[in-house]
Image (cartoon, grey):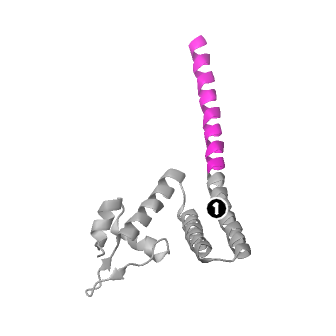
Amino acid sequence: MNIFYKIEDVAKMVGLTKRTLRYYEEIGLMTPPDRSEGGFRLYTEAHVERLKKLINARDVLGFSLQELQQYVSMSEEFINQRDEIKQTEDRELRLQKINELEQTVDRQLELIDLKLEKMKNMRSEIHLLKGKITEAKSKYKQE
């Protein structure tokens, strides 16, 4: 039996506002949940887990909403490709699908690498600034 959660419960569980949950649904980051007879959203554990993954990608990787959409799209593509591989018996076709799966993972890695490169550049700029501050401090100490 499935356990269903109301939007208030999910918002508390994942630390988002109800408005943000509706917005994520609106822009396609989340699949719309079923609704009760009264029209209330009924979220499942799968919705909660997906939200946790989104929040993790947003917080850990610093993804914008657009990057999150790309990342989620690639993750869904990965799941579909993996399922296709499991159902494919033909050796050649299976190898072709494994190659497609690898390309999807490579695109995910590129997205993460791009974010890491931006972070490295920003870190370097801040290190340069810190060096200038240290120089200024030592100048004033010598005077």
- In which quadrant will I find the C terminus? top right
Q: Examine the structure image and report whether residue 128 is included in the region drawn in magenta.
A: yes
Location of residue 93 (image quadrant): bottom right
Q: Is residue 33 or residue 87 the one in the foreground?
A: 87
Q: Is residue 136 or residue 26 the one in the foreground?
A: 26
- Residue 111 is left or right of residue 20, and the answer is right
Q: Is residue 124 or residue 139 the one in the foreground?
A: 124
Tag 1, which secondary structure? helix
Examine the rendering and report whether any part of residue 12 can be seen.
yes
Examine the rendering and report whether any part of residue 143 can be seen.
no
Mark 1 Cα within 10 Å, few/some/many (few <14, many 20+)? some
Main secondary structure along the magenta-highlighted residues: helix
Identify the residue under disc 1. 105
Q: Which residue: 68% across, 63% down?
A: 102
Q: Magenta part of the protein: which range?
A: 116-143
Q: Which residue: 62% across, 72% down?
A: 85
Total numbered labels placed on residues in the image: 1
**Above or below, comparing residue 103 to residue 116 in the picture:** below
The amino acid sitting under disc 1 is Val
Location of residue 101 (image quadrant): bottom right
Q: Residue furthest left?
A: 38
Residue 25: x percent and y percent? 44, 74
Location of residue 92 (image quadrant): bottom right
- In which quadrant will I find the N terminus? bottom left
Q: Which residue: 31% across, 61% down?
A: 13
Residue 27: x percent and y percent? 49, 74
Residue 5: x percent and y percent? 29, 71
Residue 77: x percent and y percent? 59, 71
Q: Which residue lies furthest to the bottom in this view?
A: 37
Q: Which residue: 28% across, 68% down?
A: 8
Q: Residue furthest top?
A: 142
Q: Is residue 34 or residue 21 the one in the foreground?
A: 34
